[in-house]
Each structure stands twice: as structure tokens, then as C-alpha cells.
Amino acid sequence: MHAISSQTVADAQVSSGHASESASQINQRLDQLPATRPVWMLVLLVSIGGWFEFYDLFMTAYVGPGLVKSGMYSVTTASFFGFSGLGAFVAASFAGLFIGTFLLTGLADRFGRRTVFTASLLWYSVATLVMAFQDSAQAINLWRLIAGIGVGVELVVIDTYVSELVPAHFRGRAFAFVHLVQYTAVPSVAFFAWWFEQHPVGGIESWRLTAALGALGAIAVWAIRRRVPESPRWLAQHGRYAEAGQILDVLEAKIGVQMNDYGNAFGAHIESVQKPARFCEIWQPPYLRRTLVLLTFHLIQSIGFYGFASWVPTLLVAKGITVTHSLLYSFIIAFANPVGPLIGLAIADRIERKTLIVLSAAGVALFGGLCAVVQSGVLLITLGVLLTLCNTLLSAGYHAYQAELYPTRIRARAVGFVYSLSRLSAMFSGFFIAFTLRSFGTSGVFTLITAVMIIVMVTIGVFGPKTNRRSLDLVSR
């Protein structure tokens, strides 16, 4: 496998003649790239960075029982906003995610995808390591919030990065592959949480060891940064045509083709180049309707998605299963996480993106509703696997979808803005689900998951635009 290193691009500068190449030509060359090994290698490298981000994100669920066991947190609290309850830990995670996505993702539009990708990965890795050494709920919540800021930025930058590196004809599969790699982090964090609970190391609490392992992402930063180039679309949008052309020269050389060798199948509609990036554009046609659809979607979907993903071990304990067995069952359920994106690899570019989102949400609604009424451990595991499979397929679908709906000049900022509402919603969902669990039990939580997914189906199915196999430039128009 080969990637594009900064040195390789520098070497290409000697013979490059792309100073006069236009952004439209750069975008056309990107849209015409075949689905070959060098392109997939770039996607893989970005995915590896995302693996640590998902480890950190989903760690919330699997260190929860350990935090409760340590005595620093309780499962529920007497008041709705109880900062010594597990809901506060979940809320701190999503408060950080909200700050990152709402306030800082615009940095990727200004300074580039590659730079912000690297900085945010380092940010949350260090913050998570510091959190693992804290001894009070307040300090843990603070560092969890700080780590969440970095994760929030990384989530959006990865979506933006991949959407711009990959042509329309296999963009759905590329996002499914990214999620396939990322979601292998979920059974990994589930396994480590269970393993350290069963095999203590030097008397250190299991949740601390599980959290510390996530900080290893900092080690991967330098290797990834050296081998992944800046987004050629972003470079072209900022008038840096020669650099963008050089990156594509190297990539095409690795593929063994030139642009003219495989024709001009895309690129008939190219977005305006070097047009000033204005946030107000998302409130104007054709983006206004897309913005309203995505805001509604994210307000609702996070309750259903994270209502299960962030609480699965705790919900199992609430159904009478011991902490040890709940972590073991959660570990089994976690293995379903990569399966959804694996299915997506087969169907993501064959089925319309919004249809995939609707069908996935329908599965979550169905299996969540059934979880509300069953008591058998075997049935709970089975339904948990199916629900998780649908959740991850839904995630792969909407991450691709939201990155397709805005132009390059404002893509990171626009996606960060609409996505931030799910962070805000998820932050309060921690308290809301803790309150629902106390007042209505696990059946109430699963009924809530079903209800919100029905709203998701209507929002995307009725009002969402189509994007499948369409170039980013064409969708932008």
C-alpha cells in the first residue's frame, strides 16, 4: 500500500506545471479518480485517526459502570441536573462535542483539513490521558468536556476530509469503510473495559486503564500526518492550484493513469471558486431547506442513537444483570458495530442515501421497541445486536449525507453547525435518559428511542434531497 507523503509532493513540484490549472479542473480530476488501492489507502489512513476518536467517544458507555463502582458517581440522581450522577459524565462529553462542533470546526475551512485533523487528534488524546488520573467527579467531568471539544472537531473534519478526497461514484462506500474501521474501536473499548474489570493491573481501577489506552491516538498522529495530503479541493478553493495539482499528479501516477485516460464523466457543474465563505449562505436557497432538515434530524436522532450506545451496560444493570455480566453482554453487542458499515460497503452506492437513513432508523425503532418488553438475557443480546447494527448503518449514511449538502468553501463550518445540535441534544439526553430510567424504567428508555426514530424517518424521508452518485459540485448547486 502507498500513501502520499509530504516529501513525495515536494518532489513532484520540480516537474509540475499546474500553476495555471483552474479549480474546476482540479475538481474534475478528483471526480474522475477510479476506486483503486492508492485512493482507498488515503481513506484508510484518515479512518485510523477516526478509530481513536470513536474509542474516546464510545468509551463513555463502557467506563460508566466502573465510575459508579468507584463511588464517585451514581446511576441516577435526585434532581434532573445532578452533577454527581452518571448523566453528568455523559453530558460533559457532549457539552465538549457541542463546543467543538459549533465553535471550532470553521478552523478547518480556514486552515485546512489536514492541519485541524492533526491538532484535534492530539487535543483529545492528551485530555483523555489527564482525565484518567483525576479523583473527583468534578475534575473528571471537566477533563471529559475538554476532551470532547477535540473529538467534536475531529468528527466533522473527518467527514469533510473524506467527502473531498473521494469521487461521487464510490463516496457512499468510502464512508461505510471509514465507519467500518472506526466502529472496530467499539468492541475494542468494550473488551478492555471488561478485561480490566476481570484482571486488575496494579490495583488501578478498570475505568482508568480503559481511558488511558485511548490516549495512544497521539502516537499515531505523526505517521498519519506524513502520509495524508491536504484536500486538493480545499487547496483549489483557496487558489493554491499548483499544490492541488501536484497532489493529484502523485496520486494519478500511483494509480497509473492520467485524467484523459478515463474521460470526463463528471464535473459538468463546478461550484464558484474563491467565492467568499459566508456563514449566512446556509440560511439561503438552496441550503436553507437542507439546513432545517439537518437541524431537525440532529435534534432528534442523538437521543435515539446515544440513548442506547452510551447507556447499554447501565441499562442492562437496571434490568437486573450484574456489572460484570453487563460488560460481557455489552462486549458481545459491541461486535455488531462494524457489521452495519460492512453492509453499507455493499449497498451504500446502490441505494439512495436518504432511503438508507430511513430504513436504518426504522430498524432502530423496531428493535428498540422490542427491547422495551423483553426480559430474557439472550433476547436482549440479540435485539441489542440488531439495534446496534441499524444504528451504525444509520451513522455511516448520515455522515456521508450531511457532508454532501454544502459547498467546499463552507463545508466544515456548515456541517459543524448542524451537527452541533446533536451534541447539544445528546448533552441533555444524558440527564433526560437518567430521569426517564428513574421514573419509567428501562421500558421507558427504549420506548423513547422508538419514538424519536419515527420522527427521523419522516424528516429525512419526506424533506431530504437526493445525493447518490452526484458530484459535490452538482449537489452544491
Image (spheres, rainbow, N blue to C red):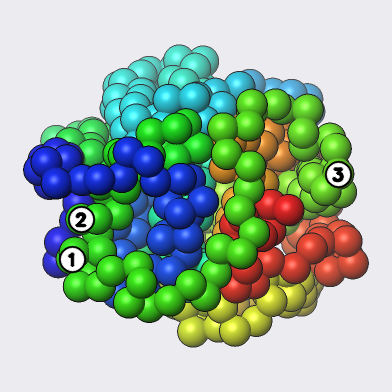
Quadrant for the N terminus, please.
Answer: bottom left
Disc 1 marks a residue whose amino acid type is Lys
Residue pointed to by mark 1: 254
Q: Position of residue 197 (x, y in %)?
A: 31, 49
- Can residue 133 be seen from the camera position used here? yes
Q: CA distance from mark 1 to mark 2?
A: 6 Å
Query: Image quarter for residue 221?
Result: top left
Image marks 1 and 2: residues in contact by CB distance under 8 Å:
yes
Q: Nearer the viewer, residue 137 or 11?
A: 11
Q: Is 198 situated left or right of 344 in this image? A: left
- Can residue 292 be seen from the camera position used here? no
Q: Is 16 situated left or right of 320 in this image? A: left
- The crowd level at tag 3 (other Cα within 10 Å; few <14, some 14-19, many 20+) is few
Q: CA distance from mark 3 to mark 1?
A: 40 Å
- The crowd level at tag 2 (other Cα within 10 Å; few <14, some 14-19, many 20+) is some
- The crowd level at tag 1 (other Cα within 10 Å; few <14, some 14-19, many 20+) is some
Task: Single out the mark in the foreground, 3 or 2.
Answer: 2
Q: Position of residue 179 (x, y in %)?
A: 45, 62
Disc 2 marks a residue whose amino acid type is Val
Above or below for 277 versus 289 = above
Query: Image quarter for residue 190?
Result: bottom left
Secondary structure, mark 2, is helix
Residue at (84, 69) in percent of width and height:
461
Q: CA distance from mark 3 to mark 2?
A: 38 Å
Question: Closer to the N terminus: mark 3 or mark 2?
Answer: 2
Question: Closer to the N terminus: mark 3 or mark 1?
Answer: 1
Above or below for 223 versus 146 = below
Disc marking residue 285: 3
Residue pointed to by mark 2: 250
Disc marking residue 457: none
Disc 3 marks a residue whose amino acid type is Pro
